[in-house]
Amino acid sequence: MEKARVLIAEPLAPEGLEILQGQARVDQRLDLDSAGLLEAVTEYDAIVVRSQTRVDAELINAGHKLQVIARAGAGVDNIDVAAATRRGIVVVNAPTANVISAAEHAMALMLALARHIPQAHSLLHEGVWRRTDFMGVEVRNKNLGLIGLGNVGSAVARRAQGFEMNVVVFDPYVSHEFCRHLGVQLVSLDQLLRTSDFISMHVPLTDATRGLIGSKELDKVKPSVRIVNTARGGLMDEQALYKALEAGKVAGAAIDVFAVEPAGDNILCKSPRVIVTPHIAGSTAEAQAEIGRDIARQVIAVLEGRPTPYAVNAPYIPAELQDILSPFLPLAHSMGHLIAQLAEGMTGDIRISYQGEISNYDTRAIKATILQGLLEEVSVERVNLVNADQVAERRRLRIIEQQTAVSEVYPSLVTLEVSTDSGSYSTAGTSIQGEPHIVWVNEFRVDVVPTGGYFIFGEHRDRPGMIGSVGTICGEHDINIHSLHFGRVRPRGLALMVLGVDEPVPDEVVQIIRELPDISSAKVVRL
């Protein structure tokens, strides 16, 4: 049998190349521009990239033989995962290989901030001995606020405890039990901002986390706070951070990642109060070797038809169950994604029930996809069939599953309920002629088809003119409504409107809707 062909488009460690060359025909083509790559990819079964190569829909569609796209690193921001999924191409990455390197870099930046090490080094290199300019602070007994407690955040927490720091954490998708086990305190974002002496970011860049720290959040911090970001650039409003530093509202910052890279002209690179490094948190010899081995093994596994631990888009389903289970996967993802956006507070139990025909089959892929939808906004880890249980176990999330042979209304029904310290949030859905339908949200019966667009979810008292009032506000702000769904408990009682809209809804418009009489809550979600 002819060996599969693998295209290496960006540098890969020798350890990875050796594994690949033992199983496949490997070509390193590091000099290809976009046009050259588009022409070359037609001949390959697999492509390996890092962060610079954009694997967009055009490139994916040109790769007629592609079975796997491998990202030698943690993120997949440069890969059109949806386009790959449509083509049946598995996308894999290496989200854990550089965990220790990233954690150590965050600690290094924190210590450098505390003791003004780069500034003192630079001045002494110029021949200036000026000790009094560099009075530092100890990290011992200081409060370290971690935004995100995934693999890297947990590693930072353990190392900070070695420096006798008090660690507090904001992460809606870890349990109090997990935090107690790690010796950290789970708090709200507001409390973290107000009490931390150091803040370190460890969450992925998603719609939910983009601009997570802006001027409003920076107004809450201590003026002595020092902020470290080794996660993703878009998590912080860089202009707001610069202004806070210049105004003395923030004592210092250390930044390894930027909204636009390369970042030589970034305003933060011009501030003497900021330590900057060029996205090198994961750049150690050990991490690169492990990434190379990890990626190579996954590429070979996919080419041989075996499951992989870090497939970002492909829960494994036996061929004989494809037609039965596949229609429920987009539904499961939408249900998890919906609850992730509607729920507030710290997550407790996660209950998943399968009723009717679907209860007769192996539903692990559905559970994994629900967890993916729940966690992808807050976790760097990509959840799939192979690692879903491990991710939930690491976060001490309790998942309760129930199967019932009878479904009263639909042939098959999947229900998700998530309890938090703020309440309980639930949704249920089914597949109708291969199309996902969300048919319950909390106590309200609806029929919403997740379209990949935006929806306004508004709870209110059922009375004449309520839907019209919201529609008028949308019209006044040039927001086009394409669908309306409505559910109520009883006439004149509590009700839910779901408006599908063609454009993103600005925060100020949502606030206007919330201020309407008899509106109890309003949120915009993307499904």
Image (cartoon, rainbow, N blue to C red):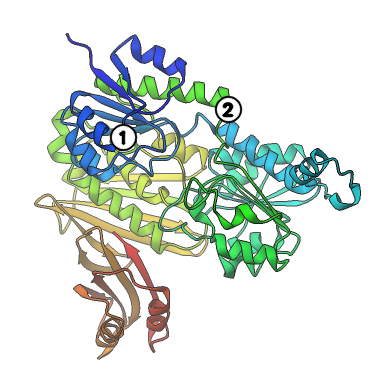
> What's the amino acid at mark 1?
Asp
Quadrant of the drawing holding the C terminus: bottom left
The image quadrant that residue 10 belongs to is top left
The image quadrant that residue 90 belongs to is top left
Residue nearer the viewer, 107 or 29: 29
Quadrant of the drawing holding the N terminus: top left
Q: Residues within 10 Å of mark 2 (few under 14, many from 20)?
A: some
User: In the figure, 488 relative to 435: above or below?
Assistant: below
Instruction: Decide if residue 85 is in sight here.
Output: no
| Residue with the mark numbered 2 | 284
Which of the marked residues, 2 or 1, is nearer the chain's N terminus? 1
Instruction: Decide if residue 309 is in sight here.
Output: yes
| Residue 33 badge | 1
Q: Which residue does the image show at 42% across and 18% down from the upper left?
A: 16
Q: Which residue does the image show at 17% across and 45% down from the upper left?
A: 327
Q: Return the x and y of residue 435 as percentages of the image width and height.
A: 14, 53
Q: Return the x and y of residue 174 as percentages of the image width and height.
A: 53, 48
